[in-house]
Amino acid sequence: MSLRENLASVRERIERACQRVNRDPASVVLIAVSKNQSADRIAEAVDCGLTLFGENRVQEAKAKVPLCSGRARWHFIGHLQSNKARDAASLFDMIQSVDSLDLGSELQKQADKLARTLRVLLEVNVAGESSKFGWHPEKVLTELQAFNRLSRLELHGLMTVAPYSSDPEKVRPIFRRLRELRDRCADQLGAPLPELSMGMSGDLEVAIEEGATIVRVGTALFGPRVRPVAAEEGA
């Protein structure tokens, strides 16, 4: 199917999931995961009505973003190394994958140099997978106040990458635990944390049913990922 047809299918999936739990489909933001997609492919996506894109690698985004439409907005969703914080702070409207207080402090420093406020989400390793990055859920609660003192970072909520499963129902508890953790964090701060970034191509429905406000979709939009011939520098 074409990108336009794929987008219509994804939007229909989002709408049906929202209907099942009496949510407004407008309450769910679709991010097109554009890793390894060319600037021409991004232009096609923008023409189809997509405006929000998620990148996993700073170096790839640094080369790609200047070539793309000004209508495109960019979120960083991959693992961010501290030595890439300067570029990330200037390139992205939001960094969804802040996975430590140390990284937060570095982003604070770089955002201060740029005299800008940077919107962020905290990445939580809900399932405790050794192969994944992110805060341990309880550590989020113990370090939340310290993070909230980083004045250049505007905390909007939490993000997680669920374990892969061919049965989306098996990861429903992961999404539910992130929502419950978000609620505990909001109570601790005494302020709303509206965003929950969770759910991808294979499990977006259960994520929405558990409260996702942002879903990150690549394969269901662009088709199976084609790896570049040359190895790319990590983010």
Image: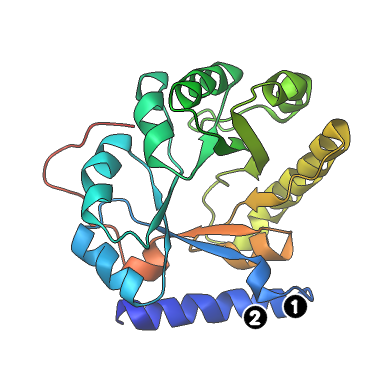
Q: Say which element carries label 1.
A: helix
Vertical placement of 213 versus 195: above or below? below
Picture coordinates of residue 7 (x, y %)? 42, 76
Residue 111 in picture, x, y percent from top left: 48, 27
Answer left or right for 140 relative to 79: right
Instruction: Say if 42 sits above or below 5 in the image.
Output: above
Q: Which residue is mark 2?
A: 16
CB contact under 8 Å: marks 1 and 2 = yes
**Which residue is located at x 62 percent, y 79 percent?**
15
Which residue is rendered at x = 47% and y = 81% of the image? 9
* Residue 4 position in % (x across, y down): 35, 81
Number of other residues with Cα within 10 Å of mark 1, as a class: few under 14, some 14 to 19, many 20 or more: few
Q: Residue type at mark 1?
A: Arg
Q: Residue 127 appears in which quarter of the rendering?
A: top right
At label 2, counting other C-alpha atoms closer than 10 Å, the crowd grade (few under 14, some 14-19, many 20 or more) is: some
Of all residues, the one furthest to the front in this rendering is 115
How far apart in space, not on screen, are marks 1 and 2 (Cα)? 6 Å
Element class at badge 2: helix
Q: Is residue 126 visible?
A: no
Residues 154 and 112: in front is 112
Residue shown at 60%/61% (left/top)?
A: 168
Q: Quadrant of residue 2?
A: bottom left
Q: Which mark is residue 20?
A: 1
Q: Residue at x 63, y 36 (%)?
A: 154
Please indicate whether residue 150 sits to the left or right of residue 105 in the image: right
